[in-house]
């Protein structure tokens, strides 16, 4: 047995493994950069070799070149003139006023102004009022819904009303009304 403390015992030498140097990654972007640079270089050369004329604004007079060519004696010369466009002003617009719409001769549910929305006259429901329903109609002074001229709650039959210009007619749950006179 050894007389040394186990903590201080000498261990046999073990050399550390040698690491190989890292290889450089291939540069995949290098061909792309070279291609773009070559394209831009070619574009610059192509653009520098051509001169384009300066743009001319529309409507500016252009110089005219006249060339004189001797003609054969007795030869007929035909000159064609350019087409000419003549612009005439448009005639003034005509104003047409449409006649006001005619008042309806039939009344559906809602409130109607007599002489404007519906024609004045005598009206009767198209069908008999259902006895289980609550048909209500009223005639008021136009613009004054609380000024009731006449009204009724009908529980059967075909009610008839006579309405005049200057009145409003309101119908609720009575069905459609048709002018009868």
Image: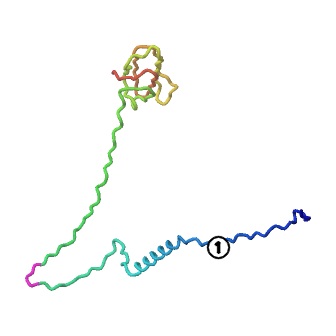
Q: Does the magenta stretch include residue 74?
A: yes
Q: Which residue is rendered at x = 87% and y = 66% of the image?
A: 8
Instruction: Name the quadrant containing residue 115.
Output: top left
Quadrant of image for the C terminus: top left
Give the residue drawn at x 22%, y 71%: 82
Residue 46 within the segment the image draws in magenta: no
Give the x, y percent position of residue 63: 30, 79
**Residue placed under numbered mark 1 in the picture:** 21
In this view, 88 is above or below 58: above
Query: In the image, is 81 to the left or to the right of 149?
Result: left
Identify the magenta region: 72-76
Q: In which quarter of the image is residue 123?
A: top left
Q: How is the image coloured?
A: rainbow
**Residue 133 vs residue 48, the one in the foreground:** 48
Q: In this rendering, would 18 be left or right of 93?
A: right
Q: Is the residue 78 above or below the residue 157 in the image?
A: below
Q: Which image quarter is the N terminus in?
A: bottom right
Relative to 78, is 73 above or below? below
Residue at figure coordinates x 40%, y 14% from the top left: 157
């Amino acid at each position: 047995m050894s007389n040394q403390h186990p903590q201080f015992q000498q261990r046999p030498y073990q050399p550390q493994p040698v690491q190989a140097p890292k290889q450089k990654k291939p540069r995949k972007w290098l061909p792309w950069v070279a291609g773009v640079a070559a394209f831009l270089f070619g574009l610059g050369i192509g653009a520098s070799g051509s001169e384009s004329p300066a743009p001319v604004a529309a409507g500016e007079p252009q110089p005219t070149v006249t060339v004189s060519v001797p003609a054969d004696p007795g030869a007929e010369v035909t000159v064609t003139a350019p087409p000419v466009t003549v612009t005439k002003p448009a005639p003034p617009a005509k104003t047409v006023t449409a006649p006001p719409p005619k008042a309806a001769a039939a009344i559906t549910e809602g409130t109607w102004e007599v002489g404007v929305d519906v024609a004045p006259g005598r009206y009767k429901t198209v069908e008999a009022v259902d006895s289980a329903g609550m048909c209500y109609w009223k005639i008021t002074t136009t613009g004054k819904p609380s000024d009731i001229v006449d009204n009724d709650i009908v529980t059967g039959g075909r009610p008839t009303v006579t309405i005049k210009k200057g009145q409003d007619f309101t119908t609720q749950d009575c069905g459609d009304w048709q002018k009868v006179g």
